[in-house]
Image (cartoon, rainbow, N blue to C red):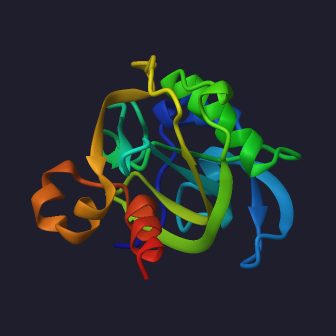
């Protein structure tokens, strides 16, 4: 559902994303330039670097986090733990560690195996509000200690779900409205 253009309202211009930048990349994830985050997510979008992190417990359950209702895109949808964008010069691992701590209170001392496991490109439009056009790295880790301290400004809720069961029974979980990047990452993980 492409849109020709998305108007810039005062709300969009004052949105926190308007003050942030992302790294525009080519299809091979080579950096091109730094662009405004809001610009990268409007109109037809600008391809940029992103990540999604899949966090597990020792029993094979994945931690799903519901995006806050205040998120501009995919608000209240369920994500595979956290997703965001590294800033210029930041590694995917450093960016993921930062977001895990900011959004869920998960500290690096709770895991020791954070690693990049996959990368893919995708483009998805969200209503008439914007677009995700990303080269998305997938990172995984297993929590040795599962204590969480979610930030309500970022996370609307969270739950632990048996990962294989979620993949094998999508109809049982469709009410969760999963984020597209998480669904792609999960599908690729089981191919």
Residue at image location 32% in from the left, 28% down from the top:
156
Residue 63 in the image, given as x and y percentages of width and height: 38, 41
Q: Is residue 176 left or right of residue 100?
A: left
Closest to the observer: 81 or 107?
107
Q: Quadrant of the C terminus?
A: bottom left
Closest to the observer: 15 or 169?
169
Closest to the observer: 71 or 116?
116
Q: Is residue 159 left or right of residue 2?
A: left
Q: Is residue 19 above or below residue 168?
A: above
Residue at image location 73% in from the left, 46% down from the top:
93
Number of numbered callouts drawn = 0
Residue 98 in the image, given as x and y percentages of width and height: 68, 31
Q: Is residue 169 above or below residue 58?
A: below
Q: Is residue 147 left or right of residue 121?
A: left
Residue at image location 54% in from the left, 30% down from the top:
15
Furthest residue in direction right, as rendered: 89
Q: Quadrant of the N terminus?
A: bottom left
Residue 183 in the image, given as x and y percentages of width and height: 37, 65
Residue 96 in the image, given as x and y percentages of width and height: 65, 41
Furthest residue in direction bottom, as rendered: 191
Q: Is residue 189 above or below residue 83?
A: below
Closest to the observer: 22 or 114?
114
């Amino acid at each position: 559902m492409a849109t020709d253009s998305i108007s810039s309202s005062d709300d969009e211009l004052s949105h926190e994303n308007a003050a942030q930048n992302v790294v525009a990349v080519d299809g091979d994830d080579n950096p091109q330039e730094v662009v405004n985050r809001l610009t990268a997510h409007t109109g037809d979008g600008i391809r940029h670097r992103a990540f999604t992190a899949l966090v597990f417990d020792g029993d094979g359950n994945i931690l799903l986090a519901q995006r806050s209702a205040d998120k501009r895109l995919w608000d209240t949808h369920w994500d595979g733990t956290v997703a965001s964008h590294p800033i210029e010069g930041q590694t995917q691992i450093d960016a993921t560690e930062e977001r895990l701590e900011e959004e869920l209170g998960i500290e690096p001392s709770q895991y020791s195996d954070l690693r990049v496991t996959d990368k893919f490109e995708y483009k998805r439009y969200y209503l008439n509000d914007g677009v995700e056009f990303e080269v998305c790295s997938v990172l995984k880790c297993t929590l040795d200690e599962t204590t969480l301290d979610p930030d309500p400004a970022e996370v609307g809720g969270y739950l632990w779900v048996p990962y294989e069961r979620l993949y094998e029974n999508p109809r049982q979980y469709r009410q969760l409205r999963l984020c597209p990047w998480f669904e792609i990452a999960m599908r690729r993980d089981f191919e």
